[in-house]
Image (tube, rainbow, N blue to C red):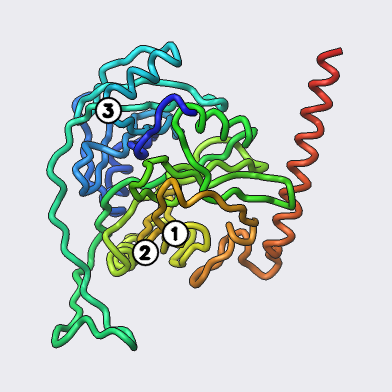
């Protein structure tokens, strides 16, 4: 039984050397953004949430994530259980926050009581004419070039030093449910896509993905939902025309099923546009998946890990990751035994 059950991800926090350069990127990416009087850059989508991105000036770094509690009662429960105060959230929308630190030192801000605005009115994407269904009759498609229309923040992916330790920490406090656990090799788990437990209410396939990879711990990417497929493609064309740094896309993932498009900000922080992802309830359970499921696409651009003339197969990547994890866990156990003597 978890302390509380969060209902969604709330925001991402960063630090960058130049707020105005970052602001231009965020506008190109499709976020409304502004620099507040306290020299903090904020970004938001069109869903009425007061902000879902923030950055302060300084050496480039990922500074933490926000999770949204289901009301002040949940925040009070968390505060009592963790022995942490409820503080005023000095940010757009106000509200209250309990600040925790995860096993790898990442700031986790759990927020409640923010004031929302009315969501923007969105244009529906044109109906499509497939071979079986003709939904667009007598009307041509006419799309306006420009940035994607970012609606909301959907998930965050982080690399952790010990997957099981971090998984337990997040689940015990926030009630996450595993959608797909990733095995590097049989019996060797390296990560999991985790969704919020909202009972019978539908929620994204994942709000948080924790992975244990042989690289620096911390932020890997944040993902923002756009209004639809045409909108994602318009955003792709716009970011390409403005010479932004493309990473991976466009394609459709296997796990989560979403159509994706990844880009980097001027300091290498990776952000994703996505649309058409899976939705599940708590009753839909959990699955086990492979590295091939994680890296492969149903269509579109292959993962950079699997691209290039000398690129390894997904099976070989899984074998290497599994061996690495086994060795690291063996050394950790051996060191612990030596320390207990």
Q: Are marks 2 and 1 in contact (CB under 8 Å)?
A: yes
Q: Is residue 130 left or right of residue 82?
A: left
Q: Is residue 47 above or below residue 176?
A: below
Which mark is on residue 273? none
Q: Position of residue 293 (x, y in %)?
A: 59, 60
**Quadrant in which the C terminus appears:** top right
Distance from disc 2 to disc 1, alpha carbons, whole Å, reads 7 Å
Which mark is on residue 71? 3
Q: Earlier in the sequence, mark 3 or mark 1?
A: 3
> Dot 1 lies on which element?
strand
Which mark is on residue 240? 2
Q: Earlier in the sequence, mark 3 or mark 2?
A: 3
Distance from disc 3 to disc 1, alpha carbons, whole Å, reads 38 Å
Q: Earlier in the sequence, mark 2 or mark 1?
A: 2
Q: Is residue 59 above or below residue 153?
A: above
Q: Residue at x 41, y 33 (%)?
A: 65
The tally of labels here is 3
Q: Is residue 130 left or right of residue 36?
A: right
Quick one: 170 or 2, which is closer to the camera?
2
């Amino acid at each position: 039984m978890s302390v509380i059950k969060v209902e969604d991800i709330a925001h991402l926090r960063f630090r960058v050397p130049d707020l105005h350069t970052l602001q231009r990127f965020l506008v190109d990416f499709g976020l409304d953004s502004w620099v507040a009087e306290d020299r903090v850059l904020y970004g938001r989508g069109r869903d009425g949430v007061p902000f879902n991105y923030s950055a302060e000036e300084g050496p480039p770094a990922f500074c933490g994530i926000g999770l949204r509690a289901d009301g002040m009662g949940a925040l009070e429960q968390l505060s009592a259980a963790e022995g942490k105060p409820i503080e005023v959230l000095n940010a757009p929308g106000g509200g209250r926050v309990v600040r925790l630190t995860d096993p790898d030192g990442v700031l986790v801000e759990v927020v409640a009581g923010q004031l929302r605005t009315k969501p923007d009115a969105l244009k529906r994407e044109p109906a499509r004419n497939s071979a079986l269904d003709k939904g667009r009759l007598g009307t041509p498609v006419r799309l306006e070039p420009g940035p994607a229309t970012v609606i909301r923040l959907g998930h965050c992916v982080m690399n952790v030093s010990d997957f099981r330790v971090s998984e337990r920490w997040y689940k015990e406090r926030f009630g996450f449910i595993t959608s797909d656990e990733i095995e590097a090799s049989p019996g060797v788990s390296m990560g999991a896509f985790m969704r919020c437990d909202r009972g019978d209410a539908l929620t994204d396939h994942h709000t948080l993905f924790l992975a244990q990879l042989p690289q620096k711990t911390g932020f890997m990417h944040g993902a923002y939902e756009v209004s639809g497929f045409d909108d994602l493609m318009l955003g792709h064309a716009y970011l390409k025309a403005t010479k932004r740094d493309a990473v991976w896309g466009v394609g459709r993932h296997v796990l989560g099923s979403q159509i994706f498009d990844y880009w980097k900000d001027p300091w290498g922080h990776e952000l994703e546009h996505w649309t058409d992802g899976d939705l599940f309830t708590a009753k839909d359970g959990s699955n086990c998946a492979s590295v091939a499921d994680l890296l492969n696409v149903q269509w579109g651009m292959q993962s950079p890990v699997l691209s290039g003339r000398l690129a390894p197969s997904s099976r070989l990547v899984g074998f290497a990751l599994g061996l690495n994890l086994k060795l690291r866990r063996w050394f950790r156990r051996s060191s612990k035994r030596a320390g207990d003597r």
